[in-house]
Image: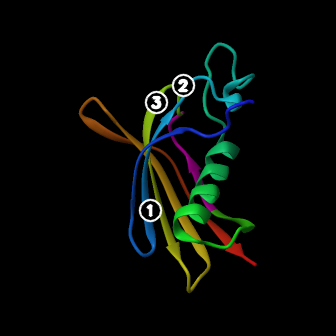
Amino acid sequence: MDKRKPTIIDVETAESEAILTLKVDADLLDFRGHFNHFPLLPGVTQIDWALFYAVEYLDTPVTFKGMEVIKFQEPIRPDAKVTLVLNWDSSKHKLAFKYSSQQADRMVVHSSGKMKLGE
């Protein structure tokens, strides 16, 4: 079976926040063909994971109603260790997400965004 999700290293949850530490394994199906000489994790995969883990750890609605803000700043490469922070605002039905990693002496934000969820 083809692997579609990263390896979860750690998960911390609070009422409306989840922080996941992930290893973005090089053998993920999503790296195939995206791109052969410079593989990177597709943006659609990052959105999919944010929604998947929000449903699992924050009990958010499963229905995606659209993106409001999205920024892809730095590529996520095979075998990267990244932190995914999820914040759920139940009053507005909005999920905020941010992928980041520590690289040398600085914190790098790979992507961030907000999506509307509902029933």
The part of the image, by quadrant, that contains residue 16 is: bottom left
| Residues at discs 3 and 2 in contact (Cβ within 8 Å) | yes
Q: Does residue 114 appear anywhere in the picture?
A: no
**Residue at image mark 2:** 78
Q: Is residue 16 magenta?
A: no
- As measured in the structure, the alpha-carbon distance from the residue carrying label 1 to the one carrying label 3 is 19 Å
Tell me the mark number nearer the camera, choosing from 1 and 2.
Answer: 1
Going by the numbered disc 3, the residue's amino acid type is: Ala
Going by the numbered disc 2, the residue's amino acid type is: Pro
Q: Which residues are magenta?
A: 69-75
**Residue at image mark 1:** 18
Q: Is residue 73 magenta?
A: yes
Query: Relative to residue 11, is residue 73 depicted above or below?
Result: above
* Image position of 71 (left or right of 10): right
Label number found at residue 80 = 3
Q: Which quadrant would the N terminus be assigned to in this image?
A: top right
The part of the image, by quadrant, that contains residue 101 is: top left
